[in-house]
Amino acid sequence: MRGSLVIARDYKGVALVRRVWEASSKVVYLSEERQFQQLSTGMDALRPVGFPAADVFAYDPTAAEAIKNGSVDWSTLELFTAVTKYDLRLADSGCTECDYEDVLAELDGEESPEHELETQK
């Protein structure tokens, strides 16, 4: 699903949090947040980079925190599919015009003054 957050393993084994631009069964095209926003609005930006589907995992907030600390346990992550459980939680929130980041923050239990959604876990 375009815009989904994912965790990708680069060619050096480094974990990266990126946004999906396009996905197929073998390749997932990813971009950094800034480039994704520029591409989404029709501006010039770096083209998304193709990663083998086997190296792209569904976004997990706990793993994202581990990445910030310099470690990630790849065996605990689920492979990315076009629609992840995290995306379904976002869709189930019922918010169609919300800022994606605000909704994700609320689903993770963080405070957001703009929206009132129940956390579905």
Image (cartoon, rainbow, N blue to C red):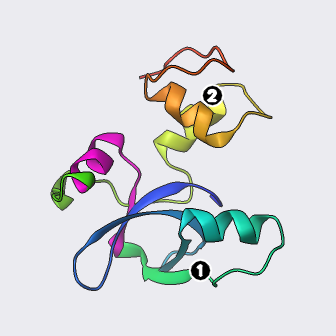
Which quarter of the picture shows residue 12?
bottom left
Secondary element under disc 1, as helix, strand or loop, is loop
Q: Nearer the viewer, residue 74 or 111?
A: 111
Mark 2 and mark 1 lie on one chain; the one further toward the N terminus is: 1
Q: Is residue 41 above or below residue 96?
A: below
What's the magenta region?
Answer: 55-67
Which quarter of the picture shows residue 75?
bottom left
Real-space Cα separation, disc 2 to disc 1, in angstroms = 28 Å
- The location of residue 47, given as percent across then percent down, is 64, 84
Which quarter of the picture shows residue 44?
bottom right
Q: Is residue 75 left or right of residue 113?
A: left
Q: Is residue 56 left or right of residue 19?
A: left
Q: Is residue 85 left or right of residue 56?
A: right
* Quarter of the image with the C terminus in it: top left
- The location of residue 79, given as percent across then percent down, is 36, 60
- Residue on which disc 2 sits: 92
- Residue on which disc 1 sits: 48
